[in-house]
Amino acid sequence: MMLSDIFQQLRARDELAFMPYQTAGYPTLEGSLANLRLLADCGADLLEVGVPFSDPMADGPTIQYSSQQALANGVTLRDTLKALRDFKAPCPLVMMSYLNPLMAYDREPLFSDMQAGGVSGLIVPDLPLEEAEEWIEPARRNDVSIVFLLAPTSTDERIRMTADLTDGFIYAVALTGTTGARRDLSAHLPTFLKRIRAVTDKPVVVGFGISTPEHVRALHGLADGVVVASRIVEAIRTGKEWTELAKSLKAATRTM
């Protein structure tokens, strides 16, 4: 299923997309796949799968830790794609990878292997918008959407350029800085999201710091979905009841 179709269905129900994150290979490759399936059982509409990388510049300590452990387990992009092909994901996957691992893979086989693994979208935090075209075409040939990030510091021109290139969804970074659970959403986030809405009706998903059902409910009418990463990964690491957390986050995506 195309990403745009998922958001269209959810919009018709006045419901936000819930996209929880897992690092491939943490705590083990098999364990990360099992957790993805559990998250789907908890109501995830999309699943974000992070490719472990040695220098994850946009990620805070929780995701960095999970990435380091996955690398220590020897998990690579190729391992991840092979595992996903056999996994048969219960809902569409969005992969997140920095540019270096992707560049070690020929582009056409890369996106073909993504499609075979059920990957519908690819987030590349360090892919310059000006160099994206050479990635977009092979991705589209394999029904994979390149997902671009916008930050609160993005200019209106940058927002327009991103909207023009987007065929899946726009990833709106809720705050400046790295990923990580937060107690409160930025007071400037509604204004930022309204700036995006003024330019495009493409789906907008908010990530970085989304941690509680209250955060999710506050985004009704402003966004089309939420990414929850560090909060869930940290709950898994500490052995807390993370499936109940995931269910509560999904419940918050529905209007009362």
Image (cartoon, grey):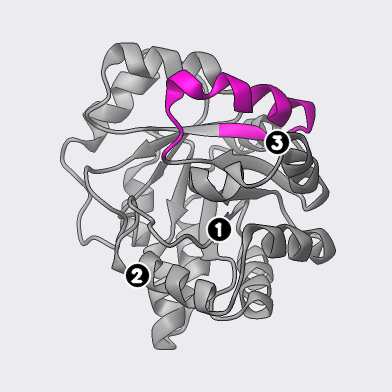
Q: Amino acid at mark 3?
A: Arg
Q: Amino acid at mark 2?
A: Thr
Identified at 39% across, 86% down, the residue is 238
**Label 1 sits on residue:** 51
If the image is split into quadrants, where does the N terminus sit? top right
Q: Which residue is mark 2?
A: 62
The percent coordinates of residue 192 (x first, y second) are 26, 28
Mark 2 and mark 3: Cα distance apart in space: 30 Å
Lateral position of residue 71 relative to residue 143, left or right: left
Pointer 3 residue: 107
Query: Which residue: 37% across, 66% down?
Result: 64
Rounded to the nearest whole Å, what is the CA distance between mark 1 and mark 2?
14 Å
Q: Position of residue 159 (x, y in %)?
A: 37, 18
Comes first in the chain, label 3 or label 1: 1
Q: Which secondary structure, mark 2?
A: helix
Q: Residue furthest bottom?
A: 239
Give the residue at x 70% y 59%. 78
Of marks 2 and 3, the one in the foreground: 3
